[in-house]
Amino acid sequence: MPPTQILTRPQRMRRKIRQIWGHDNFGHILTMAAGAAILIITGVIFYELFAQSSLSRHAFGLNFLFTKVWDPVAGIFGALPFIYGTVVTSILALLMAVPLGLGSAIFLAELAPPRLSDTLSFLTELLAAVPSVIYGLLGIFVLIPVLHTSIIPLLKNWFGFLPIFGGDFFGVSYLTAGVVLSIMIVPFIVSVSREVLLAVPQDQREASLALGGTHWQTTWRVVVPFAMKGILGSIFLALARALGETMAVTMVIGNNPQIKASLLAPGYSIAAIIANEFTEAVGNLYLSSLIELGLVLFILTIVINGLARLLILATARRASR
Amino acid sequence: MRKILTLAAFLFLTASLGNAAVLINGAGATFPYPIYSKWFNEYNKLHPEIQINYQSIGSGAGIKQITEGTVDFGASDGPMNEVQLKDFSDKHGYGVLHFPTVMGADVPTYNLPGLSAELNFTPEALVGIFLGKITKWNDPELTKANPGVNLPNHELVVVHRSDGSGTTYIWVDYLAKNSAEWKEKVGVGTSVNWPVGLGGKGNEGVSGLIKQTPYAIGYVELIYAIQNKLLYGKVRNAAGEFVKADLAGVTAAAAGAAANMPDDFRVSITNAPGKSAYPISSFTWLLIPEKFQDPEKKKIITDFLHWMLSDGQNLTEALAYARLPKPVVAKEISAISKIQ
């Protein structure tokens, strides 16, 4: 017969806690609660946007998405120029940020010596923490003069016959907003892609090198395809960020609700008009229309964010197998 | 640890008990924020037990909050319209009063490379430019008003505010008074559907765009133009004189309009009569409910209004706001008694 151990009260408590803490059910409930919280927050935001935009949804129906007039005085609201501006600037931003971001992520993960890689990726993460108003100011005071004096004249000289580079350039434009956004989203692509590339198992690289592949072939044919889903995830994340950016875009896009083929023309974006007009919006229909714009942006962002999340999850599972 | 917490809680409690301040909350227009915060600060020095808290969240939001009853007073750069007044009285069972506090003005500012002259603008020229009908700097409407100035044969770039703002309200109110076409096509509001132009966020956004875009023209608040030493033009007033905006000219505009001042003070003073009146001027208002449930709050608000209309007015010009003309002050003092 083993000697009976007499436990003091705190000891019993501690043992009890350890039992609960170690139990699977406990972990299950804890993480499920965290997951549910996110679902609830998203649900509440969606519900609020949906409910509060009812006036405008009933007044304009689906026409809201396809008409171009935004007239607060007459009470006529159409979202098309804003949707167009949001999508165009985001795509422009991706076109510039993806090659740059992916290139530097490959360098940091595959080629750079570890110390340099760590320093550089720390700096990249710092870039992500710069407030967007700073990017907007840099856009106005640094980027626009450079575009004005050197880049745009060159573009017009070479590609002026293309409609996307037609018309006058006033400094503020889709293109300016796209460039500013691309600088803002590069850190997201670099940081996430670098982590994903580093997570590629070493034996994959060794196998390729053993078969006689060069370093570059190994990187391009083995490592990048292996990490592709994660890299895509980082790009989608960056896109979602670009879609929702407010301050920096407002400062450099020109705030003119028109749809022009030229990237040098001023435009408008969904986030920018909400920021510009929400505080002074009087009248229920006006407010409701601004909220419906929020709903449109939210749906766009949710779809894209959802895709990115799935991709990242899928990569993580595959890597862990 | 526990001791420290207890001590902290105790200190916190005594601090909040010892300073039994009456807190008055207000919200609204951003344009008068500097003078309002100066006033509330000075008033707090005279009456340390009273704390007036003002949030400059925009005129539209100010009207919304006073209607919801979440603040004790509101503030707005444009008077409340009939629908908004009705919303308020439907909800509360009593009305809301407008009290003009100070005045502001808009000025046309521009960027003509190599030209630093103060240009003259007729109302017709400004209307034409902002309707997109006058597209070149050497348009006859502009050259006619500026004899001796060599205006370039170059396209104009129009710049306006992109954010909803009282500044825009004053500007388009002025354009609408001078043009039936503007009134019908565009109308008056804190944000409008602009026929032409680039949008800049805030006075700084507009002046930044103008500075960086050769041949641009736009409008900013007079205070902003004075403080930042911007070049701005003269505007022809209702009496046919070209007037350069300054504080005296704005006060003159209010004095010119004072003769026909309605009892509720909801009046636009753009295009006011008078030889020296600057035509693109406006009041900004405090919105005060007619009834207060709390007699103490009522006493504080009425006392503050009296102070604002007397000593308070002496603080305005140091901050580049135009003071109220005497007849308006007298009329407002008698209106304070409407607050119950």
Image (tube, grey):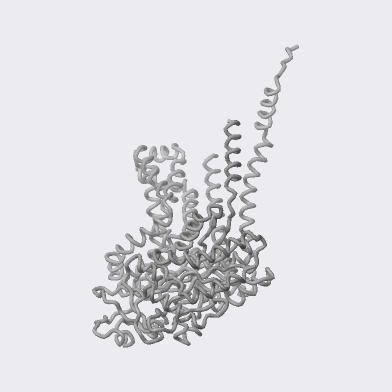
Depth order, front residue of A10/B45:
B45
Q: Considering only vertical position in the picture, is A67 above or below A197? A: below
Look at the image and tell me whether residue A295 can be seen: no
Q: Considering only vertical position in the picture, is A321 above or below B219? A: above
Quarter of the image where the N terminus of chain A is located: top right
Quadrant for residue B85, please give it. Answer: bottom right
Q: Position of residue A291 (x, y in %)?
A: 58, 65
Depth order, front residue of B328/B29:
B328
Look at the image and tell me whether residue A129 can be seen: yes
**How many numbered callouts?**
0
Depth order, front residue of B143/A190:
B143
- Residue A9 falls left or right of residue B307: right
- Residue B169 falls left or right of residue A50: left
Q: Position of residue B1 (x, y in %)?
A: 58, 30
Q: Considering only vertical position in the picture, is A243 above or below B182? A: above
- Residue A317 falls left or right of residue B208: right
Quarter of the image where the C terminus of chain A is located: top right
In percent of the image, x 52 and y 59: which residue is there?
Answer: B55
Q: Where is residue A86 in the image (x, y as percent from the top left)?
A: 48, 65
Depth order, front residue of A152/B19:
B19
In percent of the image, x 63 and y 69: which residue is there?
Answer: B290
Q: Position of residue B236 (x, y in %)?
A: 37, 83
In percent of the image, x 40 and y 80: which residue is there?
Answer: B277
